[in-house]
Image (cartoon, rainbow, N blue to C red):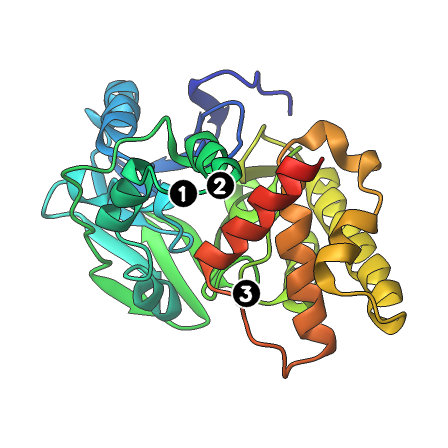
């Protein structure tokens, strides 16, 4: 299926819609809408109130006839859930139990304060502006899911069968996909960055395994967390990147090279057109902790510093 990669709501057929936000880089996430029998399930909200209102306004032509009675968050990254509070109070919000637990890890107040911090080193200041600058975190209250589950939850949207399948930890601790069997479609969340560099916050090898689980569904259409609508080739590309960086990191780990030097040394030019290539710094760190579990896990701010430094060097 060819879907123009343009900002806004796109009809995919079979009562499915994708809301896309080019260029798909930091914070520019996608969302989805599954409709049937006069009701809708929303897949993810967006990073701030302005973006989420724009999305809900664009969906209004559909949701006036098929109101959003339920929503779900594919994972806890703020660009997929900070807009939750704009949904009607009667809307049931689903998420994996781990996703719900992780939603408090990064607060709107923290991101707003980070944007205003003028004491950061120049390279980190520039990176913070690049990653967070376009978004407005003031006035956001994080609305948590009202229903949680572990592993799998089968729902009906009207009379349509929809499955929420937890495949994390991978990108985050609780990554969940939404499978719509009768439409041969999967909303992948950030297990798929389409034409964008993935970033491993949680479990490196399990993300590679999660790619296989998605491929086993043999879906015709994959709606990614970031980037253009794609098919199985998109998830194979992510898997290829993850395997390549892991294998290259292993060579350098065995040679005694530290993670920062390894991230500088690995040639990611084959993926340079994806953007966000600085994420290799976080991914190599995650690979090193896979090779040596005694290594301390870096906090998200520490990982941001690593990526900012890599970006400044390249």
Graded by Cα atoms within 10 Å as few (under 14), some (14 to 19) or many (20 or more), the crowding at tag 2 reads: some
Mark 3 in CB contact with mark 1 (< 8 angstroms)? no
Q: Residue at x 60, y 45 (%)?
A: 309
Number of the label disc, if any, that sits on residue 14: none
Quarter that holds the C terminus: top right
Which residue in the structure is indicated by mark 1? 120
Q: Position of residue 210 (x, y in %)?
A: 64, 61
Q: Is residue 217 visible?
A: no
Left-right relation of 232 to 34 = right
Q: Which mark is in front, 3 or 1? A: 1
Left-right relation of 282 to 87 = right
Mark 2 in CB contact with mark 1 (< 8 angstroms)? yes
| Above or below: residue 292 compared with residue 119 | below
Give SS at disc 3.
Answer: loop
Give SS at disc 1.
Answer: loop
Most foreground residue, 51 or 97: 51
Q: Residue at x 77, y 56 (%)?
A: 261
Which residue in the structure is indicated by mark 3? 202
Number of the label disc, if any, that sits on residue 124: 2
């Amino acid at each position: 299926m060819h879907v123009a990669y343009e900002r806004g709501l796109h009809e995919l057929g079979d009562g499915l819609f994708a809301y896309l936000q080019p260029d798909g880089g930091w914070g520019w996430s996608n969302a989805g809408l599954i409709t049937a029998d006069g009701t809708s399930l929303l897949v993810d909200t967006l990073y701030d109130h302005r973006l989420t209102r724009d999305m809900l306004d664009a969906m209004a032509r559909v949701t006036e006839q098929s109101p959003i009675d339920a929503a779900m968050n594919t994972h806890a990254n703020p660009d997929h859930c900070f807009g939750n509070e704009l949904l009607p109070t009667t809307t049931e919000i689903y998420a994996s139990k781990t996703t719900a637990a992780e939603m408090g890890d990064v607060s709107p107040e923290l991101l707003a304060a980070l944007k205003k911090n003028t004491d950061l080193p120049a390279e980190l200041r520039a990176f913070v502006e690049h990653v967070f600058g376009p978004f407005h975190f003031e006035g956001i209250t994080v609305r948590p899911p009202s229903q949680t589950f572990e592993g799998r939850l089968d729902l009906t949207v009207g009379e349509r069968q929809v499955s929420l399948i937890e495949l994390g930890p991978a990108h985050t601790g609780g990554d969940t996909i939404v499978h719509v069997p009768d439409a041969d479609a999967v909303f992948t969340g950030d297990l798929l960055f389409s034409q964008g560099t993935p970033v491993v916050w949680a479990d490196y090898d399990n993300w590679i395994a999660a790619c296989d689980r998605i491929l086993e569904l043999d879906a015709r259409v994959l709606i990614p967390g970031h980037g253009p609508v794609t098919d199985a080739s998109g998830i194979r590309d992510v898997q290829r990147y993850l395997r390549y960086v892991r294998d290259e990191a292993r060579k350098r780990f065995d040679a005694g090279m530290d993670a920062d030097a390894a991230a500088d040394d690995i040639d990611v030019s084959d993926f340079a057109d994806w953007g966000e290539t600085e994420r290799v710094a976080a991914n190599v760190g995650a690979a090193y902790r896979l090779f040596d579990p005694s290594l301390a896990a870096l906090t998200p701010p520490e990982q941001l510093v690593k990526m900012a430094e890599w970006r400044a060097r390249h």
